[in-house]
Amino acid sequence: MTDDGGEVDPEEQEFLRLYGPWQPWEVAEAVDALKGIDSPWWVAGGHAIEAFTGVGRPHDDIDVALFVDDLPALRSHFAGRFDLWSAGGGALRPVTDTWPDLHEHSQQVWLREHAGAPWVADLVMSERRDGAWVFARDPDYAVPLGDATWVDDAGVRFLKPEIVLAYKAKLTRPKDDDDFAATWPLLDERARGWLRDVLTRLYPDHPWHHRMSAPAEPVGRAGQLVRLREATLADAVLVDAWDKPAAQSEFNDFGLPPPDPLAEQLAHGRRMVGSTKGKLLVERCADGVLLGDVGWHQVSYGPNPESKAVNIGISLVREVRGKGYGAEAQRLLAALLFDLYRDVVRVEASTDVENLPEQRALEKAGFSRDGVIRQAQFRRGGYHDMVVYSVIRDDLPRG
């Protein structure tokens, strides 16, 4: 048990038993401890995110980075004050005259005063190639240290936030999601582009891709009857009720369990808007009553990026169907997608051949009937033919 009566995490308990407790430095303590060392150093991890965003967060440790070839200077600086231990791969070995280098699985140095003292710092030992800092996740990326870091008003050097996020992307713990949510809106376009590129190469299926593709400002579009807007936590009870099987129309009943509750989908700063998929709520302009939602997902007609299209769908509560809301909502959504995503050329929708109201709504919205795809959808125990409609960028009137 902890002092406050909470349960101790079993993994943490085992860690403490094997390696001992941590009492990490704050940034000011690291600055004081490293004062006078004849080697560059910088703060990484959560402290670097906090320094950039100004958003306070708890810290389990402190990540201070130095170049690995400066290990002798580090030993000399802390001689007689702190013991250095080479850490990594589940192994610890002291850094001494007998073992002056890191062990083969180590990229970190843990620091403490003596065997009975807590650990105070996790020093990340970075590679230096021809004088340049090397990104450990992608060793082909090597830049001058000044291009990988920034310095605050007090003269403390920090790893750039987009690089910290690139390191954190490997794990995506809840705290990493929180750091992404706090940092992403503050990054400039260069930093955003770098992070997108790195995650595309290293983690092509990473959940942050969806959030990075969301526009910076809240997404919405208003017409005469309805407006489209992003969901908020205040909408959770109603939206979750719509997703129950009993509320589905016969054409949306696939026998699947409801999706995750809206509050979970929006947790840690997530937004339900992206170039590959998304969802917006449909709200009546006259009184602000929510009528349903519209959604979209990317489909492909070839292996190259230019062969992508966007497929949309709509779900309205029963009592407001047939009143023109669906037609306007789908027209607004198509126009919005064309405006948001300049590489989108085709927006399409498919519906059951028996769903005549939705076919009429799509035609009123400006979609053209492309044809029938046979036995395309399995629903309610059988296969169904679907009618495909589409609108291309040049079809919609300006304004």
Image (tube, grey):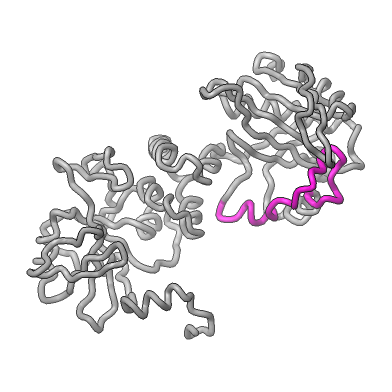
Residue 328 image position (x, y, % from top left)? 80, 28
Residue 243 image position (x, y, % from top left)? 78, 49
Q: Above or below — where is 94 with respect to 49?
A: below
Residue 102 image position (x, y, % from top left)? 18, 61
> Residue shown at 36%/80% (left/top)?
17
Main secondary-structure element of the magenta-colored stretch: loop
Q: Above or below — where is 369 with respect to 105?
A: above
The quadrant holding residue 223 is: top right
Q: Nearer the viewer, residue 251 or 84?
A: 251
The quadrant holding residue 89 is: bottom left
Q: Nearer the viewer, residue 253 or 155?
A: 253
Residue 71 covered by magenta stretch: no
Q: Nearer the viewer, residue 214 or 107?
A: 107
Q: Nearer the viewer, residue 299 or 73?
A: 299
> Residue shown at 53%/85% (left/top)?
5
- In the rendered structure, which segment of residues is drawn in magenta? 243-269
- Residue most extreme to the top: 394
Q: How many marks?
A: 0
Task: Tell whether 131 sits left or right of 330.
Answer: left
Task: Tell whether 372 sits left or right of 302.
Answer: right
> Residue shown at 70%/20% (left/top)?
399
Residue 250 covered by magenta stretch: yes
Task: Tell whether 366 sits left or right of 109.
Answer: right
Q: Above or below — where is 45 with respect to 340?
A: below
Residue 356 image position (x, y, % from top left)? 89, 26
> Residue shown at 44%/67% (left/top)?
58
